[in-house]
Image (cartoon, rainbow, N blue to C red):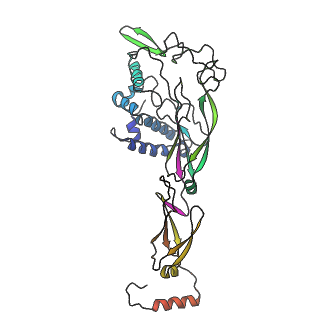
Amino acid sequence: MNKNPYEVLGVARDASESDIKKAYHKLVMKYHPDRNPDNKDAEEKFKEVNNAFDILKDPQKRAAYDRFGDAAFAGGNGAGAGFGGGNPFGNGAFHFNMGGGAGMEDILREAMRGFGFGDFGGGRAAPQRGGRDLLDEVVIDLKDAYFGKTHTVKFSSNVECEKCHGNGTFDGKAAPVCPRCGGSGFVQTRQGFFAMESPCPDCNGLGHKIEKKCTECDGRGTVHKHRTLDVKIPAGIDDGARLRLAGQGEAGSNGGPAGDFYLDIHIRPDKRFERAGDNLVMRVDVPFTTLALGGEIDVETIDDKKLSVKVPAGTQVGEKLRVRGHGMPTRRGGFGDLYIDVAIKIPTKLTEKQKKLLNDFAGTKSEKKGWF
């Protein structure tokens, strides 16, 4: 039984596109198979979340659902189409359909078929179906995010058959129109007042009939292959960013376009640096004498450069020293700043001479208020 996509994602019917994406991202990470191994309930939730997002992210599908409910996807055009075949990735990624394929007219056409009213388009060719989109995710170090890197993804998916160019024919040419359905992919039968439609038995709803099939793909137009994609992760990328490679998803059917490939980026926390937008913050222990009298400290930046940073006399613990241009790369082509969070490490072992000097210092008085 189909479930209300708004309820599945936990959003209102007037939710914005941004709210829908936020809800989807939160739930899909919660129920991801890698985080819930051997959990059938989580796997089912995961599918429901993707089905719901497939409907609500597409303005046409969302409008159709708002008007017709589940009937808008009768005949196999629902968001669930595209979850067969299991997990195509060996490294934890997953398939999901982000909405390529049917337009509004196709949705209404299928809805009318579901109610038994037959075809109202008249004589049109069988609709093309876009290929499924693919999604993977990767966790990288902050240093990788600073320099950028190329991430190699290995997976398997359906691709267009090279031998027949996706036509499924022996000679690689487009298959002739099916004479029985005239290219629509459906045949019509009458039962009293009603005109019923069903997939054409001669062409199986494709709209064309292949007399001699391609020996490589057996007429399907696609073959299942192991694939490798090199995805360039740009320098300065943000945690949670999503990269898109157009046309690198699964091959479409019936001449439809290929889907897209998406890569979600997650950045591992760094031991030395904390990121704040385009800026970086690092905590540095500074000697008391340097804070009081002023001086310089040596720090190592994220790109392994050593800098000598000036510490003004009277610098307080908790202050931040700003070093311009040594943060993360920015989209504008520059760099953010590095902030040094001033801390102090109190020595635990002192010599007698050091103790005497500190006692002498503690006993001194100054005419100015605020002296330590």
Quadrant where the C terminus sits is bottom left
Where in the figure is residue 15, as x and y percent of width and height? 35, 41
| Magenta stretch contains residue 270 | yes
| Magenta stretch contains residue 5 | no
Q: Is 346 situated above or below 243?
A: below
Which residue is at the far front? Answer: 333
Q: Is 135 situated above or below 171?
A: below
Q: Is 18 situated above or below 270?
A: above
Highlighted magenta segment, given as a residue range: 257-275
Residue at 66 percent across and 23 percent down: it is 216
Residue 305, quarter of the rendered image: bottom right
Where in the figure is residue 275, as x and y percent of width and height? 49, 59
Left or right position of 330 against 221 = left
- Near-viewer residue (203 or 304): 304
Quadrant where the N terminus sits is top left
- Near-viewer residue (237 or 91): 237
Where in the figure is residue 61, as x and y percent of width and height? 40, 31
- Near-viewer residue (143 or 91): 143
Left or right position of 302 against 6 = right
Badge count: 0
Which residue is at the far right? Answer: 215
Where in the figure is residue 343, as x and y percent of width and height? 50, 73
Residue at 50 percent across and 54 percent down: it is 333
